[in-house]
Each structure stands twice: as C-alpha cells, then as structure tokens.
Amino acid sequence: MARIATVVVDVMGGDHAPDVVVTGVRTALEHDPDLRIVLTGPADVVIPLAEESDRLSAVPTTEVIAMDEHPATAVRSKKDSSIVVGCRLVREGHADGFFSAGSTGACMAAATLVMGRIRGISRPAIAAIIPASDRPSVLLDVGANADCKAGNLVQFAHMGSAYARAVLDIAEPRVGLLNIGEEPTKGSALAQEAHALMVEQVSGFVGNVEGRDVPAGTVDVIVTDGFTGNVALKVLEGLAASLFARIRDVMTASFATTMAAAVLKPGLTELKRRIDPEVHGGAPLLGVDGVCVIGHGSSGPKAIANGVHACARAVRAGLTDMIAEAVATPDA
Amino acid sequence: MARIATVVVDVMGGDHAPDVVVTGVRTALEHDPDLRIVLTGPADVVIPLAEESDRLSAVPTTEVIAMDEHPATAVRSKKDSSIVVGCRLVREGHADGFFSAGSTGACMAAATLVMGRIRGISRPAIAAIIPASDRPSVLLDVGANADCKAGNLVQFAHMGSAYARAVLDIAEPRVGLLNIGEEPTKGSALAQEAHALMVEQVSGFVGNVEGRDVPAGTVDVIVTDGFTGNVALKVLEGLAASLFARIRDVMTASFATTMAAAVLKPGLTELKRRIDPEVHGGAPLLGVDGVCVIGHGSSGPKAIANGVHACARAVRAGLTDMIAEAVATPDA
C-alpha cells in the first residue's frame, strides 16, 4: 500500500476550469486509493464536490488569479486566491503538495513566496517532462530564470536528477548540459563554466548534449538556462503539433486516403499518445520548500489527473528532502 | 536571361565528397544556363571534371581540411586547401560566391579571414533556412556566435532581412526577435535590450516571437543569439527526423499497414519534401564580404545543387551590397 499523500488542487486553474479540473480530480481519486485531495476555489464549486468522497475536503476561497495578471502583483494582492491559499496549506502542513493548471507565473510566485525556497537553493526552476521513445526525460529550466549563472545550472542538475529518481523511477539519472557542441570548450561562456562545475559536482554528469538530444531522450536530465530551455520546449511542442496537423491533412485529402488512414490510426494514435504532453500532466516547480506541479493551461481531465499523480509520487518519494540533501552535499 | 554568376565549389566538402559534390555540380549547371562553376580540390578530381563543360573550370589544390580539425588552426596552416583557396578566389574577384559542404567552422574561419567582414559588421552570422508550410523563413544566428550583444542581434536582423529579400523573394520581410514571451519586457537582459534597439533600428520588426513560431513560420526572419538559435535548429531537425522514423515504423508494422501506407505515400512524401532541409541546400554565412553558403555535411546531390543555386541567387541580387547598405543606414 502506498503512503497516504494529500494534494491541494486549485479548481480554478486552467482554460477549462473548473469543469475539467473536477473531472480530473475524480479520476485521480479512482486511480489512487491512498490519495487525499484538498480543493481550493469558490465555495459553490468546492463544497458540493467535497461531499462526493471522504477523501476530498474543501477550503473555499474568494479570489481567482487570471492567466493574464502580473504574477507577483496578483499573488501579493489576492491573498484569498485559490493559488495562494493552496500554497499556504502546504506551507502550514495541511497538505503535502500543490497542483494547479493556472498561471505558471502566479504559481511560481506564490510557491516561492509562500512555501519559500529549499535551504541552499538560490533559484527555483521549472522542469518539463519530455516524452521520448523509451522513457521520458527532464528538461530544466524551461522559463523561470531567463538569465542564469553557472552555479544555478549546477543546482538545476541536482534538482532534475532528484525528480527523475523520485517520480520517473530512474535509479541513476544521466545528466547532460545543453550546449552547441560536444567538447567541453564549446559554447557560451555560461555553458563552458557550467560544464567545468558539473564535472566536479554533479554525479551522473555525462557532458554536453545538443538540441537533437532533447527529442531523442539521450540522457535523463537536460540542464540549461530558462531562456534556452523555454525556446527548446516550445520549438518541440510547436513542431509536433504542426506535423500532426499536416499528417491529418494528408490523411483526409480523399476517400482513398481516409480509408487507408483508418488502418494506420491505432498505430499513429499510440505514437501521438506517447509523445503527448498530457501523459505527464504538468511541470514541477523544483527548489521550493514543498511539492508543486503546474499543469498546462490547456490541460484536459487526463492531464489534470496525471499532474495530481505526479504530485503524489513526488510527495511519497520525499522529493523535497532529496533536493535538500543533494544541495547540502553537492559532490555526492 | 539571368546575369552570369560564378560560384566556387569545394569538391572535397561533405561526408560523401567528392562523388556527391560532382553529381550536384552537374545538376546545378543543367538547371542554370548562366551559371559558371570553379572547382577547388585535388587535381585528379577537378581537372577531368572541368573538361566536361566550358562553364566549368578547375583550380587544383593540394590540401583538405577535415571535419574534425580545429577550424582556425586548419585555415591558418592549410593555405592550399580547397576551402581557403575557394574563399581567396572570391576575394580576388575570380568568382562571385563560394559553396562548400565541408566543416562549418573551417568555412566560417576561412571566409572571415580571407574575404573579410562587410564594413560595419562586427560579427558574421550563420543563417538557417527553415521550411514551413507556405514559405521558408530565415533563422539566425544558428551557431557562429555563442555569446552576443544586443547590437549584434540588430545586425543579424538586417542581414537576415537582406537574405530574405535577395534569395527568398520576400519583398518586405517581417522580422521577429526570439524570446520567451510576447511582451517587450519579457526574457533575458539581452533580449530586452535587443527588443528596444530593434524597435528603433529594424524596419519590418514585428516584436517578440516564441519557440513555437520557429516551425510555424509566423515571421520571415527570426533573430537570436548563436547559442539559442543552434539549439532551436537542432531540436527541430532532431524531432522531425525521429517523428518520420517512428511514422515509418507504424506504416511497416504489418501487411495491412504497408498496403494502407502505399495510398498515403505520395502525400506524406510531399509533406516530408516540404520540410526537408535538402531543398534549401545550405546555410548562408552572412556578414562576410562575399557570398558564402555552407552545406550540411550529409548533403546529397540535390542539396549540393540547391546550395549552389542559393549562392548564385544571392550573387545576382547583390546580397553583399544590400547588407552593406542596411548596416550603413540602420534606421532605413
């Protein structure tokens, strides 16, 4: 039996909130009998929902942070928002982790301000779980820190490696530094300095990797600054979406192609499913003192459920302690 | 009738040199009756080849720069290499442009050292031509400059825009700055500073674009530093290759899928062709005082021919003068 995990879910997070979130919450509870969920959001949504199961409870909130609000300002002014209250519940020990498909910036600001950073971590980072043919990999930072120092990248390596062990069940993650050449002397001044530090301080460090290694899943953890990581992630998402759309056009071009496509559909659907970001359900914010997973705004119920599961797995594995230990003993 | 253009081709450039280059040269001559080609490479290759056509001439060279040699060192020590001699022929006015599918670093070093930079250009940049659904776009820098200043990015914008006009027939190219958010205040310090300069100095500047705009072709010219651009390009190439490989696996999984795939093959082949980097045949090195296009090491004959054609188009349009003018009057 898995250890009980209590996850706060922001029912107002995402483009299709609260309906999609509610469905996702029900699915998550079905699949994990040891999961408890605390709902934050408007009373008329969370109170009736909480009555559905004794593993659900409600903390009504009166404010909502919209996707387009300035994150730090919104978090400071809307203290009774579903996001800020959710983070506070983790901070105060009422829950173990927080999941929201709301504004990434607001979740990041709230988690950092309310939960605080893990001792020794200078910059929390957002990780993306990249689907690959055999097993997923962790790419970070994908946007929390547009400008980084080499020491930040070393901490990202520790945090990404801890997440891969805790949530993706990879016993000894191989860590690569995203660069524009394989040799240690290649790349920007930042990449060269980070390479030198990572050789000394990061266990599992295999050296530089290049852009093509991101979709290939050559290593388990790919470390980069938040500018490069964000661009890489969005190139990946953009190309996958546009290629599948164009393949659909080819398949529906005529009666004959539509018939032929029907034969291929199971295989292609499985392929699409394997590279579907919905499967992993969210981007963990690493380095804050509590588990926090941020879902894509466009998350469907499956992505919401998977985001909650990722939260619960991170809680059960003791992710936060693992990161704290890795940073305390950087040459481990 | 097109103006006569004379292009030097390094027959020793590329993984499959000289055979593939020789085939590509013949194809290029067939398609462009006003093209002259000067061949650099070993006497036993270039002299017999030059006898095939009075539009071919040979300049035998005794040295070859390998893909894995240190670029600057090799260029300085191998003065009679096919790359260095090729650039010198342009410098001395014996030819208008240079094409090689050899070492990118060596071509860049040779072109910069031998041809020199266009007056006013501080850093030459390598551009990649990104295939998109309707028309290609120019992404630069993709690797010449791992660390950039905002002023470099402004020059990249001028150079990319000139290339789009000269070679891609885009009358008024729209220029975007690759960033991690649409607002001018988003992104790294470099991106914010570059945004402010580009608003003032770059005609056709439409603001920030994001990673997903690279495959989408939202704008005609995408400007970024050589680190981010290289990662973006390689993510794109890597994902496209791996997706097509996996689609092929789905299609060849059984007799039924192979039959069905046959119906879809023309459409998918056309789709693959449209996003195929071979179509554009090479990456122009912009900012050097002469036309220089560098082909992919894995170029086939079609890519070689298309790289030579791109060179000829740039020569005929007066690309070098266009860049010099754009830099002389940056607020044009």
Image (tube, coloured by chain):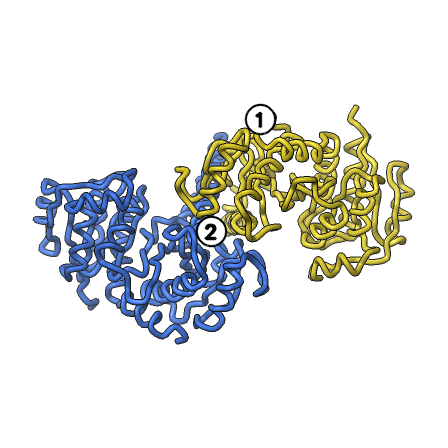
Chain colours: A yellow, B blue
Quadrant of the rendered structure where residue B64 is?
Answer: top left
Identify the residue at horizontal 44%, vertical 59% (top origin).
B149
Dot 2: what SS? Answer: helix
The answer to whether residue A94 is left or right of residue B245 is right
Quadrant of the rendered structure where residue A167 is?
Answer: top right
Pointers 2 and 1 in contact (C-beta within 8 Å):
no
Dot 1: what SS? Answer: loop
Looking at the picture, how far across and down is residue B161, in whole percent? 38, 66
Looking at the picture, how far across and down is residue A194, in whole percent? 50, 41
Quadrant of the rendered structure where residue A30 is?
Answer: top right
Task: Say which amino acid is labelled 2.
Answer: Thr
- Say if A16 sits above or below A292 in the image: below
The answer to whether residue A193 is left or right of residue B13 is right
Q: Which residue is mark 2?
A: B228
In this view of the protein, which residue sits in the foreground, B272 or B189? B189
Task: Say which amino acid is labelled 1.
Answer: Glu
